[in-house]
Amino acid sequence: MKRRQILAAGCACCASLATSRVWAQPAESYLVPERFQRPDLASDEGGLWAMMDREEKLLRRSPLVLRDARLTTYVQDIACRLGAGHCPDIRVFLVRTPQFNASMAPNGMMQIWTGLLLRMDNEAQLAAVIGHEIGHYLQRHTVERLRDIKSRAAASQVLGLFGLVGAIGSLVVLASAYGYSRDQEREADRIGAWLMHRAGYKVAESALVWNNLLDEARAREGSEPSQTSPLFATHPAPPERRDTLALLAKDLPGGTDGRENFTAQTAPYLAEWQEDEVKRGQYAESLVLLSRRIATDNAPGMARYYRGEVYRLRGQAGDLDLAWTDYQAAAADASPQPQAFRGIGLLARQRGQKEDARQAFARYVELAPEAPDAALIKSYLEELGS
Amino acid sequence: MKNLLVVLLAMLLAACASVKKVESGANPVGDRMSITVDGNWNHLDFPGLKPAQVWTMEGIAIDELLVYPGIRDGQAMHPEFSANSRNKDFTFRKTMQTEELVSMFEGTLSRDGSTFKLKKVEPFAFGGKKGFRFEYERIRKVDGVRLSGIGFGAVDREELFALVYQAPRLTFFPRHQARVEAIAKAVVIK
């Protein structure tokens, strides 16, 4: 048995070596490795798995994890279609955090943050991110990275200070801090594209994920972000990545984008996720994101309300006029957000348009009598006179 | 690991912080604010949370009373907190309306990835000025602890004065809420 395990490990190692330049191979040649066996606890990889198991135990109890079985199952099913034989080892957790992030640990724990879900236009884009993370998992990049860092002189000092357990913990922290190398990112992109294609998704959508993220980063930085942003600094240059994925898509044509299903599954959460986005206070990025949603959403009224909020809160020259236009459009929606009327009321009150303010506030209180700010708005109504 | 991080963070902060007891009675804070307290409050002074002062009853990892003793127009809220982040700071503007001020606190308290749910906002006379009071719930990102919080504030002569108190929803917040409400009612703004 032990001999077989050694052989299997050797084969896995060979497979890893054989695929270490996966991004340079033709699209059809990638062989998905067999399911991984739990590594020996005494090994560095075993220690890493044990650490991730503990993290997963904590994550399971976290109140930040979405407890919606329907949405979690939907995303888990996407991961299963992409991961195929590895499906039983992948466990998806959706975490309520408004930033763009997804990760997959070596033990199969996958985290997807709600800020990422909000930024996806369709199921194929989500599959692109999940496929990318599964690519890291299949190539055991975290372990590679761990060993790379472990070999550095600084790490050996840590080893001496805290013993093996402490060292593994520190190295995990270091590994996550350093992120994957650029070659690993390229490899994961390419594997992700293959997995997408094999599962029937439109690979061209993967380039759009990167493009959209780049647009937000440009708005934040006010220039090309590749030189300044830590995220882009550890990844291949954005244009290269986008162009490579677009080229891959030409080799891997066809597929569906799954937009309709994705829209239906995520619809119940859109208000909450957009509200979390506005609270971030990163207005330049939010404006790019929300403007894209307005341009592509079937029912853009909600996104117009939230974009109005961003303009009102940013409050730069001309912003209040833009907020006014967005609130008006949102209020004219077939199923308007009640808060759109509050927005109109607040701006009208600020401009001294008392009658407009009174009408809008009255409508808001009528539509949302239990709103957290109902008492405040009623005090404005009293001040305005009824 | 996250719990360990909280403890390490608290130890780190404690190591950098100077702690002094807040005496019962009226305590001047800044040039124009006076806070009257009873009980064993401690004032922690450490980098990262200015321009607020941080007071605590139970210890910094458990409860905190953030005191904003006159934030000026254009001044950022806790700018050092995000010194290594590319995130833009939340900045006070003298023209802000109540909703914008509450949104600024929402953003400040959720910038670390914590959730913030506003439960109530209403008019409140703070320091004898026309102000506001708000209640919220927060799930702290670093350890997943559910917190309850209350805030009070007013803008006077282009400066923001505010108190924000938060503590774990179970046990600690109910234990001190009445005490904090009394402090807020007794605040004097000169």
Image: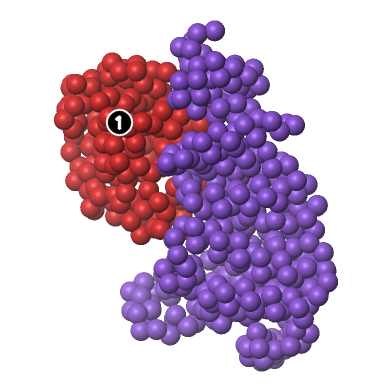
Chain colours: A purple, B red
In this rendering, the answer to whether B119 lies above or below A303 is above
| Residue found 48% across the figure and 74% down from its top | A234
Q: Mark 1, chain letter?
A: B
Horizontally, is A202 left or right of B97 in the view? right
Of B80 and B64, nearer the camera is: B80
In this rendering, the answer to whether A99 lies above or below B53 is below
Q: Mark 1 points at which residue?
A: B160
Percent across and percent down for residue B67 are 28, 33
Horizontally, is A34 left or right of B71 in the view? right
Q: Which amino acid does label 1 sit on?
A: Leu
Say what secondary structure mark 1 lies in. Answer: strand
| Residue found 28% across the figure and 16% down from its top | B128
Of B167 and B73, nearer the camera is: B73
Percent across and percent down for residue A317 are 42, 41
Horizontally, is A131 left or right of A359 in the view? right
| Residue found 70% across the figure and 62% down from its top | A125
Mark 1, other Cα within 10 Å: few <14 / some 14–19 / many ≥20 = many
Whether residue A255 can be seen here? yes
Percent across and percent down for residue B26 are 18, 22
Percent across and percent down for residue B34 are 20, 24
Which of the 4 quarters of the picture holds residue A139? bottom right
Can you say which quadrant of the picture contains the C terminus of chain B? top left
